[in-house]
Image: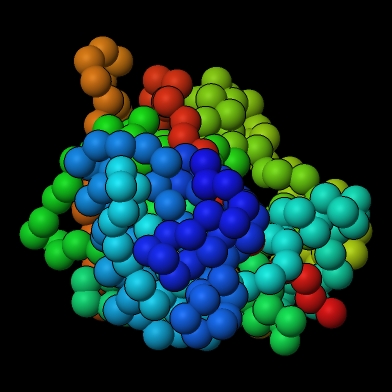
């Protein structure tokens, strides 16, 4: 941990720690050369895999330009740590604001935020190769003083060609249970639809004031013949229209094929929740395999692209596969609106 007043690179002076997660701590700092405030992210773990992941986050963010993404200005190593310098966004994250309110946000406000989040996902998922964030949640969403949502913490993000695979232990990178879909918990591969599940879970949390049932709990109940434990959000908050509640249930389907297939499709559904359900493109996908019960559990990261044909089809029950209890990591930081 860096003490207040510490200088890094004889340029960045630490003001205070503003957050800490599984892979790093984030500080508010002053760039004494330019005189402006910056956010300084430091790795707090050692090892070649962590170093590579942190460098990947730096290069990834530096290559992107979108109003909902923080601007990266520097990346360097000093001593035993690696540091990322990026735009400082003052304020609290949405999870903190929700806790301070002690009741859900207004529906219109949440829908505005959701539209902004899905806009940046449209941008990320269109990159070559597509970039999957894999840790969207209220804690990773900040708002500028102008009301712009900013998506933080790309420590779990991936961006790979279809022909490439990268294997990492689940305990290395982790996930956040209430916002992670089954395929991420299982470690069988994530794609753009995994991010859409997390967006649905985030909207659910902001509209209900409570975290949604996690995929493991839901899957266990469904396999035992019980009803899905994910309660429709309109049954928790009467201000939420039933049609909007149904959009969120589709986004959080256990089976990726039953979700919206693109951020654009989900964005359109949220703008017109009373329209017929839109599942987007048909995706030809190998069923999720079970995770071995013994031996070190690993995640194989792939980045499949959706097929081009568009279909409408009735919903059908998802068939989840329940893995062994995973080793869960944790992640990190993020402001007020109106």
Q: Residue furthest top?
A: 294
Residue 317 image position (x, y, % from top left): 50, 44
Residue 65 vs residue 218, the one in the foreground: 65
In the displayed structure, 233 sits above or below 35; it is above
In the image, what residue occupies the spot 27% across and 33% down? Answer: 169
Residue 316 vs residue 109, the one in the foreground: 109
The part of the image, by quadrant, that contains residue 128 is bottom left
Residue 212 image position (x, y, % from top left): 68, 44
In the image, what residue occupies the spot 42% across and 41% down? Answer: 44
Q: How many marks?
A: 0
The answer to whether residue 124 of the structure is visible from this angle is: no
Q: Is residue 286 left or right of residue 280?
A: left
Here the colouring is rainbow
Residue 247 image position (x, y, % from top left): 63, 64
In the displayed structure, 75 sits above or below 330; it is below
In the image, what residue occupies the spot 27% across and 69% down? Answer: 59
In the displayed structure, 50 sits above or below 239; it is above
Q: Residue furthest front?
A: 10
The part of the image, by quadrant, that contains residue 293 is top left
The part of the image, by quadrant, that contains residue 173 is top left
Q: Is residue 104 left or right of residue 251?
A: right
Residue 2 image position (x, y, % from top left): 52, 47
The answer to whether residue 41 of the structure is visible from this angle is: yes
In the image, what residue occupies the spot 38% across and 58% down? Answer: 83
- Report the quarter where the C terminus lies: bottom right
């Amino acid at each position: 941990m860096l003490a207040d007043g510490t200088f890094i690179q004889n340029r960045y002076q630490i003001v205070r720690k503003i957050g800490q997660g599984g892979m790093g701590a984030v500080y508010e700092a002053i760039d004494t050369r330019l005189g402006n405030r910056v956010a300084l992210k430091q790795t707090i773990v050692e090892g070649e895999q962590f170093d590579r992941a942190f460098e990947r986050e730096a290069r990834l963010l530096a290559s992107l330009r979108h109003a909902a993404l923080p601007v990266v200005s520097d990346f360097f190593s000093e001593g035993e740590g690696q540091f990322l310098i990026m735009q400082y966004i003052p304020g609290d994250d949405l999870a903190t604001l929700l806790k301070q309110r002690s009741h859900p946000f207004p529906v219109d406000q949440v829908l505005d935020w959701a539209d902004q989040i899905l806009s940046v996902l449209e941008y990320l998922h269109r990159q070559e190769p597509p970039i999957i964030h894999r840790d969207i949640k209220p804690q990773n969403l900040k708002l500028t003083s102008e009301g712009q949502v900013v998506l933080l913490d790309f420590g779990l993000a991936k961006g790979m060609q279809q022909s490439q695979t990268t294997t990492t232990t689940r305990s290395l990178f982790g996930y956040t249970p209430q916002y992670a879909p089954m395929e991420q918990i299982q470690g069988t591969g994530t794609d753009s639809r995994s991010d859409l599940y997390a967006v649905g879970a985030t909207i659910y949390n902001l509209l209900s004031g409570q975290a949604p049932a996690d995929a493991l709990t839901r899957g266990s109940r469904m396999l035992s013949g019980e009803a899905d434990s994910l309660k429709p959000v309109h049954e928790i908050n009467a201000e939420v229209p039933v049609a909007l509640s149904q959009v969120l249930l589709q986004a959080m389907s256990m089976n990726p094929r039953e979700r919206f297939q693109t951020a654009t499709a989900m964005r359109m559904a949220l703008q017109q929740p009373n329209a017929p359900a839109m599942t987007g493109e048909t995706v030809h996908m190998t069923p999720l395999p079970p995770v071995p019960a013994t031996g070190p559990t690993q995640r194989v990261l792939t980045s499949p692209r959706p097929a081009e044909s568009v279909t409408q089809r009735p919903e059908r029950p998802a068939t989840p596969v329940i893995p062994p209890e995973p080793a869960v990591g944790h992640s990190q930081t993020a402001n007020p609106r109106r």
